[in-house]
Amino acid sequence: MKKYFIYFGSLAIIFTTLLFSCVKTLEEEGVYSTTDYIGTVVEKSTMQPIKGVKVQVTDGTHVHASAITNEQGAFELKGINFEEVNKNYYLWLDGTSLDLPCAQEQLKGLGRKTFDYKTLILYDKTNASLLPKVTTEEISDIAALTAKVAGNVTANGGHEVTQRGFCFAQHQTPTLDDSVRICGAGNGKYTYTLSGLSKSTTYFLRAFATNSIGTVYGAQKTFTTKSGKATITTTAANNVNYNSAVVGGNITDDGGDAITVRGICWGTSENPTLSNSHSTDGNGIGSFTHTLQGLQTSTIYYYRAYATNSCGTTYGTQKNFTTKSGLPELTTTSPTNIAATSAKSGGNITSNGGFNVTTRGVCWNTLGNPDTNDSHSSSGSGNGAFTVNMTNLRVGTTYHVRAYAVNQKGITYGNEHTFTTTNGLPIVTTSNTTSITATTAVCNGSVTDDGGFAITAKGFCWSTSQYPTTNEQHNNLGTGTGTLTSSITGLTRNTTYYVRAYATNANGTVYGTQKQFTTSSGLPSVTTTAVTMSSGQVVSGGNVTSDGGYPVTARGICYGSYPNPDLSAAYTHTTNGTGTGYFTSLIDTSTGGTIYVRAYATNANGTVYGNQITVNLDYLRLPTFTYNGHTYRVAPDPGVLYNWSSADAYCSGLTIYGYSDWRMPTQAELVMMCSLKDIIGGFSLVDGYARTSYWSSTTNINNNHYSIMFDFCEGGFYSCHLECTGHVRPIRVEN
């Protein structure tokens, strides 16, 4: 076997010719097609494979193939394209990620039609720890032609670092054969500002350090120089006048090269450059302004901001503006205070055009586009707002009005407004009618405007037909504007009337909106009060809330066994005085069952009845008691002994006297019932005493199979199994 040794510092690469080799034949003179390269990297002394070594084939400018060794140290370079026969090609090993040095060896045999690929590569790591260690730091201050680079020698390998610096190129993995900048010797951080670079160019850079053992490189960094072209915007023009304007620009980036001159170029043609009119407004980045002067009136100007550095001149986007005419600028204010023969308008002069306003005012006509040849009125001079009164106008006529202003350049007009004078008639409103009775009502309204002519008559007109006029019933409440209020009388009861306010001046009579109201019936208003039991008597009554405008001559209640009781002979009625207010009546209780009750009231116009109340007299006779602010009604004892669930079912299922909301009393309610047992009555008695026990709905808190039962004989409670039997008295709450 034949071995080739090539040393790079402490690195030895041994190429061993194997029993076979991959052979590639030249296909065209000077050009090879693509091929593959398979090999293994091992440590020289131990022959152990090395994982993580970057293996590349390069011509010094381009990397033709690249791979990382695997666990077995193997690599495979696919699709290598050797473009030129006589060009130098290298095998490059990069072990920096493993703290190993980098090295390269020129590939042999490329000067003939066939060549061999050596497939076993040996690394000599014996002296690797004696080499320096260096890192390539971040690159900063990148400009068009310069950049600041940094490195750091972190260890010298036990041998003094005699030289350190940077190598860089426009291709990857630069070495000392490329551009080099020396930055002294020794350990530690160091920086260097590269100059003479090309703009808009990508560079590859590595820090390096050399001691007596050899040279090592830091990791490769990449940077791209700036274009040198400034970033600049043109700002909008402002304060544009007839002969001047303020323009400007903003430089946000100098492109990596200092701005030496900046400013504005302008002209009456598009895309002005430095060959046109231009300004010089300092240097450097940032915003700036310039006032253009000596401009022509009513002219379009184009302008661009510019910035110049050693790489050339850059222009911002083009903008334009138009100088003013020199004439005043104004607006017309909307007409106000519009009447039958007058109105008020005016204007606001926002700019005098650069020349004093000598006259200003408004002009008007009935055709449109009024000017000072039409009716007009002036109002002083100068800038600002002004008002003018327009008089001697025609009633009910549409006018056009414009403000105007005059300076030495001429006259200009504001925007046009239209308005219509009023018809000269009054403005009248009708409000709601109040205090309505059977024969009277109070009408309300107002006259808010006389239409420019004196009010000679005003008032109300009314009728049972719609839209009444002064040809029907009406009154006259005098002259002038103001509020109208009048009581009208002699109306017919229970009748709908229509009413309108009116006002008259020299131009005619105007009516307000129509309102309607209905006179009352003249009958009383009455309600029926509740039917109650008091001291063994059944009591009802009523409340006469209104006499309808006529005295109440009789009042009382009527009742009977049929609905809607009245004063007819089929029902019983009472008489309980006269007038309005509350009254009470007694109901004959000689019979039982359900009765119907209504209060009544009578005046000269008839009799009215209150709401109907239905009541069962037998229910009213049931005993009651009061507890905790509530009134309870007590149903009779059914006289049957029940267990607890049967007693509960009996109460909840009970429907008598039209009520179905009965229930068992609670323990507390039974106590109250026992204290009133002589008044309530109806309990089971033995020898004059109530000696039986009654169920409550309250269960035993310690055992839900037991409930509380009250012994009406002993007057105490005891817990009894739910299957025991006892009496029950259903109750219901009335309020």
Image (cartoon, rainbow, N blue to C red):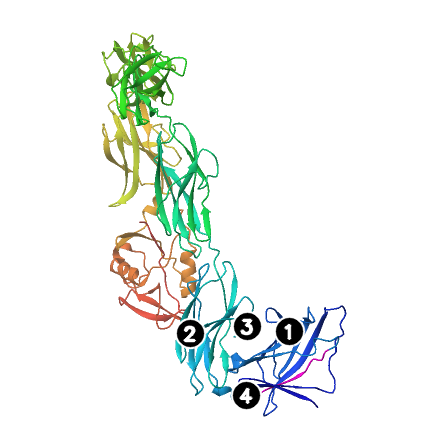
Q: Position of residue 156 (x, y in %)?
A: 43, 84
Q: Earlier in the sequence, mark 4 or mark 1?
A: 1
Q: Nearer the viewer, residue 265 or 388?
A: 265
* Residue labelled with disc 4: 125
Residue ranking furthest to the bottom:
46
Q: Is residue 407 left or right of residue 45?
A: left
Q: Is residue 315 left or right of residue 679?
A: right
Q: Nearer the viewer, residue 514 or 305?
A: 305
* Residue labelled with disc 1: 88
- Which residue range is magenta in the image? 115-126
Q: Residues within 10 Å of mark 2 (few under 14, many from 20)?
A: some
Name the image quarter holding residue 517: top left
Name the image quarter holding residue 377: top left
* Residue labelled with disc 2: 183
Task: Give the SS element for disc 2.
Answer: loop
Q: Position of residue 229 (x, y in %)?
A: 46, 52
For the point 46% across and 39% down, the residue is 272
How far apart are the two marked residues, 2 and 1, measured between alpha carbons? Answer: 30 Å
* Residue labelled with disc 3: 173
Please, what is the three-letter code of the amino acid marked with disc 3?
Thr
